[in-house]
Amino acid sequence: MSRLGELLAAAWGRVRNANPTTVLLVAWGLLIFYGFPGQMTQDSYDHLREARARIYSDSHPPIINLVWAFFDYFIPGPFAMLVVQSGLFLAGLYSILQWVFAPRRAAWITAAVFLYPPVGVVMSVIWKDCMMAALLAIGTAALVSPRRSRKLLGLAALCLGTAMRYNAFGATAPLIVLLFEWRPGMPWLRRYALALAVWVLTTLAAFGINKALTDKPMHYWISSLAVYDIVGTYANLDETLPDARLQEELAGTELLIKQDLHATIREVYSTRSFFPILNHPQKTLWNLPINYYDPAPEAQRDAIARALWRTISAYPMAYIKHRLRVTAAVIDLESKHQSGAIIKRAARDLTFMHEQGLATGVSKAQMKLSRKLHWVSWHTPLFVPWVYLALTLLLLPLAWRQRDTMALLLSGLGMESSLLLLAHSVDYRYSHWMVLTTVLAAIFLATRRLRAAQAARHPVAAS
C-alpha cells in the first residue's frame, strides 16, 4: 500500500472510531454554521419584538415570547435560541436512536438525520415549530426511561412542546399513550387509561400556560381560520348565491364588499393562504387585524363566529371540499415545490433589524449553501410532504408489533392530520415533524428487519 493509501486508511479509521461526543459536536457545529446567527422570518420578528416589549399576545403561543425573553437577556438576538433549539433537538435524536443502536453508531446516524436537509434546514430558523420539535424529541426520549424522574421530565418537555404550537397535541397523543408507562407490568387497560389521562392533563396544562401568559388577547383565529373557512366554503359551492342571501348570512361581520359578493369571494380565495381575504389590493373582504394589539370589536367577532358555524352546517360538503383542497396544498399535491422549505437569506425588514441591533450580513458560503438547497427543494421530491405521508402509511402495517416505531409514525401522522382542520396557509415547516418521524421509523424498521434476517441466516452467531 502506498504512503497516501496508508494515511487515508488511518484517517478513515480515526473518523470511523470517533468518540460519539465528537461526532455530535461536529454535526451541531455544521448546522450552527449554516444557520448563524439564527435565520429569521416575519414570525421570528414578531416573537422577538413581543419578547423585548414584554407583550404576550395570542397571535402566536406566548410561551415562545417568554422563552426568547429569557435567553435574549443573556445573549441578545437569535443566536442563543439557535443554540438551544438545535442542541435540544440533537440530544433528543441521539437518545431516541439509542433505542436501537449502540452509542457510536447512534451518534453517526444522529448526525446524518440531523443534517438531512429536510430535517436540518428548518432547525436553523427561529420558529416556535423548531422549539416544539426540540422539546418533543427530548421528551419522547425521556418517556421510555426506566427512571420515574426522567419520565416526569419527559412529560414536562412534551407539555412545553405542546404549548409551542396549538396543534402539537396531535403529535403528543400517540407518544404519551403508547410510550408512557408509570410502572412496569401494569395491566394493559390500566396502563393505557392512565396514559390517556396523562396526555389529556398534559395538553390542558399546555393550553393553560398560554392562557395564563396572554395579556393581549387578539382572538387571532377569528382573523385567520374563521374567515378563511367561511370564504373557502362559499368558494367551493357549486351554485352561485345572490348578494342579498350572502349579506343576510354574513350579517354583522362588517363586509367591505357589497356587490358581486360570490364572484369576489371566489376571486380572493386561495388554497395556499388566507391573506388575500384581508389584504387584497382592491377586494379586501373584511377589515380585521392580523398584526399589533387592537383586536376586532367583540360584536364583529361574535358575528363572524356565528357565520362560521352557520356556513359549515348549511354547506358541509363545500366545507369538506375546501379543507381537502387546502390539505392537498399543504402536503404539496398541487405544485412541484414546497413553500417555505428554504427561506430567503435577504433581510426582510432592515429598519426593524437595525433598531433591534440584529445582524444583517450573510457569508458567501451560507448564501451558496442556501442556493444549492433551494435548487434541491425545487427540482427533487426531497422536501415534498406527501412523499413522507405516503411512506408513513406504507410503514404503519410493518410497525404493528413495534410500539416505539408505531408511536413515532402515529405522532407524525397525528400532527399532519390536525392540518386537515387547522391549516390556513401553506408552509413546509408544518410537516417537519412528520418528516422526522418518518425518517426515524424507516431507520428503525430497516435495521430490525436486517438484524432479523441476519439472525435467521446465522442462528448460532446471533445467539
Image (tube, helix red, strand yellow):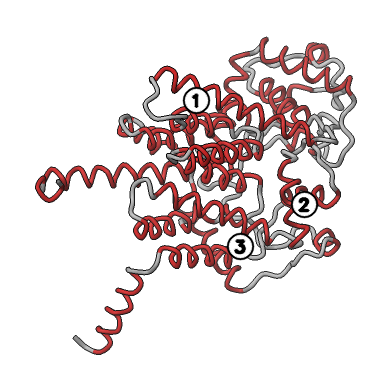
Q: Mark 2 points at which residue?
A: 69
Task: Where is residue 5? Give x, y as percent.
Answer: 25, 83
Residue 39 in view here: yes
* 402 with respect to 81 (left or right): left
Judge left or right: residue 440 versus residue 372. Answer: left
Toward the viewer: 280 or 438? 438
Inspect the image, locate mark 3, and give the three-letter code of the amino acid beneath it: Gly
Left or right: residue 402 compared with residue 51: left
Q: Looking at the rendering, in which quadrant would you find the N terminus?
A: bottom left
Q: Which mark is residue 195?
A: 1
Q: Which mark is residue 35?
A: 3
- Single out the mark in the foreground, 3 or 1: 1
Specify the quadrant of the image occupied by residue 459: top left
Q: What element carries label 3?
A: helix
In three-dimensional space, the C-alpha distance between marks 3 and 1, rounded to whole angstroms, equals 37 Å
Sequence-wise, the earlier of marks 2 and 3 is 3
Tell me which amino acid carries mark 1: Ala
Secondary element type, mark 2: helix
